[in-house]
Amino acid sequence: EAQVTQNPRYLITVTGKKLTVTCSQNMNHEYMSWYRQDPGLGLRQIYYSMNVEVTDKGDVPEGYKVSRKEKRNFPLILESPSPNQTSLYFCASRQGWPDNEQFFGPGTRLTVL
Amino acid sequence: GDSVTQMEGPVTLSEEAFLTINCTYTATGYPSLFWYVQYPGEGLQLLLKATKADDKGSNKGFEATYRKETTSFHLEKGSVQVSDSAVYFCALRIGGSQGNLIFGKGTKLSVKP
């Protein structure tokens, strides 16, 4: 089944404790992206990647890191999480052409205390 | 900069009612326009899209027409069902090969039997 998977689905952590949210897709998509969804703000892009070893900042990259060492994986790293990073996070992927559909993962709900 | 404005929700309708969710955009050039839907507890799914002026996107009984003169892409459905209850996001694709999407804040639709 073609899908984007994220782990964990739910995470409660404390300020300053490094964490990684994994994202994996099995569709051989070049493009991958991370978003955060907050009430009243919709989805905002954190980082995106056009292909392996090619990443770039989105609209709200502060406090986040990403890497793209393999085509299928695009982990999101929070080196020192803070409470304002409490949010619902989505990973998405897309085949090459920009107007193609983005396929979204099921989301990771992160709470930083 | 480029942006998307959606009508505020929540919207509550009875089954078989007519649905309109307004979406207007500000963009340089001629963006592609999308509607994504998020069912409870899930990631976003593409509902429909239009890539040039006067195009009509349609899917599952939903329609939206790309109106360049009014910079709008309103979502309509003639007869909603309880299963249409979800959050609907209007989005535009900004220029360039990246194909990054800018999302509106989302409109929550609840359909009562």
Image (tube, rainbow, N blue to C red):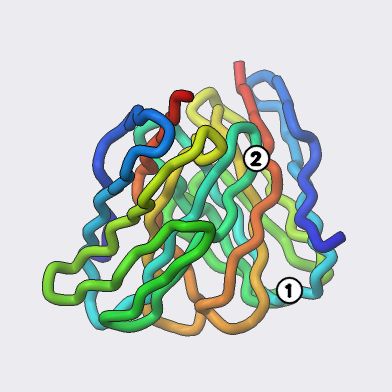
- What residue is shown with label 2? B42
Mark 1 chain? A
Q: Identify which residue is drawn at 55% across, 27% down.
A: A86
Occupied quadrant, residue A30: bottom right
Q: Identify which residue is drawn at 22% across, 58% down.
A: B24
The C terminus of chain A, quarter of image: top right
Mark 2 chain? B
| Residue closest to the far left | B69
Q: Looking at the picture, which amino acid does disc 1 mark?
A: His
For this rendering, which residue is in front, B10 or B111?
B111
**How far across and how far down the image is residue A58, in percent?**
48, 60
Q: Is residue B79 left or right of residue A22?
A: left
Secondary structure under tag 2 reads: loop
- What residue is shown with label 1? A29
| Residue closest to the far top | A113
Q: Is residue B51 above or below residue A9?
A: below
Residue B83 seen anywhere in this rendered image of the structure: yes
For this rendering, which residue is in front, A88 or A86?
A88
**How far across and how far down the image is residue A64, in percent?**
59, 47
Q: Looking at the picture, which amino acid does disc 2 mark?
A: Glu
Residue B94 seen anywhere in this rendered image of the structure: no
Marks 2/1: CA–CA distance: 20 Å
The mark total stands at: 2
Density class for disc 2 (Cα within 10 Å; few <14, some 14-19, many ≥20) is: some
Occupied quadrant, residue A82: top right
For this rendering, which residue is in front, A4 or B23?
B23
Q: Is residue B69 left or right of residue B43?
A: left
